[in-house]
Image (tube, helix red, strand yellow):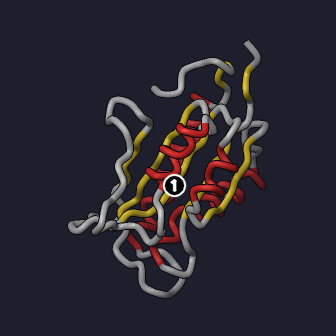
Amino acid sequence: MEPVARTAVIGIGNEFRRDDGVGWAVIASLRDRAARRPLPPGTVLAQSDGDPGRLIGLWEDTALAVVVDACFPPSAQPGRTHRWSGHPDGPLHSAGPARHSTHGLGLAEAVRLGDILRRRPLRLVVYAVEGADRSLGTGLTPAVARALPGLVRRIEADMDRYGEVPAHGPRDD
């Protein structure tokens, strides 16, 4: 089987909405890291506003897509990070009418649309970081900023572990 070598790390958010910029901050950290030590060959780092069509375009034909976004649940523990990879946690669910996203359509809708269109990565890993502040302004709150280095290390481990998957290999853990 021919391996698919491309990895996409996609940070979703808005750097001008405080903790909603955590996805973009991850991409900035990975770019800084790449300047010191190269990322695996074929790695693409992208910032996104979360539009489903653009997300699908970024992750299609990848062996691995890692998506990072902020979430704002009612009882948030800022900086707490959740990882989803399709198994064993089940499918992503949209946030519903009282959604906790700052995006019109969410990541769950993009994943479902990608499945329907058969334009999904072979393996998808999603990190959701609980935020405290999504008001106008730049800079992460201290708790979310403290979570950033550990999150980047987890993403690097995912890239090492899953970055090259056989073209007809498994989609989930």
Q: Residues within 10 Å of mark 1 (few under 14, many from 20)?
A: many
Q: Seen from this angle, which residue lies furthest front? A: 116
Q: How far across and how far down the image is residue 93, in percent?
A: 35, 49
Residue furthest toward the left? 75
Q: Is residue 52 above or below residue 90?
A: below
Q: Is residue 49 something one can see in this rendering? A: yes
Task: Please say whether residue 25 is visible from this viewpoint.
Answer: no
Q: Amino acid at mark 1?
A: Val
Question: The C terminus lies in which quarter of the figure?
Answer: top left
Which residue is rendered at x = 59% and y = 67% of the image? 49
For the point 61% across and 35% down, the residue is 118
What is the residue that sits farthest to the top in this orientation?
1
Image x and y of residue 84, in percent = 41, 41
Identify which residue is drawn at 60% across, 18% down: 169
13 left or right of 89? right
Return the residue at label 1: 68
Say how many tags the image has: 1
Residue 26: where, in percent of width, then height? 58, 59
Counting from the top left corner in percent of width and height, residue 68 is at 51, 54
For the N terminus, the image quarter is top right
Residue occupying the point 56% across, 62% down:
50
The secondary structure type at the circle numbered 1 is strand
The reply, left or right, for residue 87 in relation to residue 105 is left
Residue 91, above or below 130:
above
Left or right of residue 52, residue 101 in this image: left
Snapshot quadrant of residue 155 = top right
